[in-house]
Image (cartoon, rainbow, N blue to C red):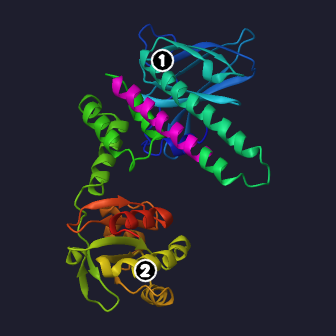
Amino acid sequence: MKKLISILSFVILIASCGSGDKSSEKQNGFKLSGKIKNTTGSISIQEITATGLVFLDSSNIAPDGSFELNGSIPEKTFCTIRLPKGDVIVVIDSTSNIQLDIDADKVENYTVKGSEENIELQKLFLINNASYAEMRKLEEKYAMYGEQVPPVEVQEQIRNQFDSLTNANKTAIKEYILSLQNSMVPYFATSFLMPEADFELFKEIDNKLYPKFSASKYATALHTRVQDLAKTAIGSEAPDIVLSDPYGKQIAMSSLRGKYVLVDFWASWCRPCREENPNVVKLYNKYKAKGFEIFSVSLDDNRDAWTKAINDDKLLWTHVSDLMKWNSAVVKQYSIEGIPFKVLLDKEGKILGTKLRGEALEGKLNEIFGY
């Protein structure tokens, strides 16, 4: 698997101990042994963390392909055995005794014994890999046109097929992980999904597994994430914001109740925000007479830069800021990870959508107000 760090962004770094005592009769550390073919040299295992891979152990590969990896981990932890043509991901703790049979040329077809949980984990990858194999075929179909742009009907066909595959993959993963009863695998599966788009699934996993695995760093991280996402989940009442406008007057977002409100988190220094502003201006002018308002919350820390951007971009609606940049209370309040970040509210202040930009925002407003 590629980009291991981004797909496990929720993992919390914990200390990893050294090698276990191989001579002890009672196992006090993990043991991963087996055979690997079509490669030579050494093999290593590393813990996957939010800040990088943490080395646990390495082993020379014997002439017959056999190897053994050992170490101590205080709780069930996702780790990787990295190979040139792919990775073998395992979940282990200090009681694990797992046997692996790996072909370095066809890593995804490895076999695992001694751990039902790792068999379940491999099945998750096989489900996901099958979908990506079909997506690669679509990419090849598009690439056949070289530097030429495919006809519109071909682009639409490929886009529809891609969306269909994505939805089918998501459904397959959901059905599979919800069928697992006492497994850490669903926590890894969340790395294949989008937290905001799949919030209900994240919540279902949390409700089902947190009582069983509440001491786990993965369970704790997802539980916290679900609680944060719940604040801005579609259908939830948006947390109120009360901040000062450029003239020092405090304005509450809730004062705009009775209108559809776009809460626009932005900053003068944010290039994508500034590039999006003309589109927002166009939509504001189109729908303001129909009950559309904008409540812009700036993550600036310089008043002059903030007000200049408002004037330069002709943003003729409500603006507020505490001029604390990323230290602003709204960042945590709305779980903001990047800007521009937009939240659309209905007349009662409930969330209709998040991360709406460009055509997505225009389409949502067209849906509400009509063309």
Q: Residue at x 28, y 60 (%)?
A: 351
Element at label 1: helix
Residue 252 left/right relative to 282? left
Residue 162 left/right relative to 154? left
Q: Position of residue 94 (x, y in %)?
A: 43, 21
Q: Residue at x 31, y 22 (%)?
A: 181
Q: Which region of the structure is painted magenta?
A: 158-179
Instruction: Say which quarter of the image contains residue 187.
Output: top left
Residue 254 left/right relative to 117? left
Q: Position of residue 47 (x, y in %)?
A: 52, 34
- With respect to residue 63, does 238 lie above or below? below
Q: Is residue 56 visible?
A: no
Residue 119 marker = 1
Q: Position of residue 218 (x, y in %)?
A: 37, 37
Mark 1 is on which residue type? Answer: Ile
Mark 1 or 2: in front is 1
Residue in the foreground of this view, choosing between 291 and 357: 291
Residue 106 marker = none
Residue designated by label 2: 301
Q: Main secondary structure of the magenta part?
A: helix
Mark 2 is on which residue type? Answer: Asp
Residue in the foreground of this view, choosing between 202 and 35: 202
The quadrant in which the C terminus is found is bottom left
Q: Is residue 4 visible?
A: yes
Look at the image and say whether residue 317 sits in the magenta stretch.
Answer: no
Residue in the foreground of this view, choosing between 249 and 283: 283
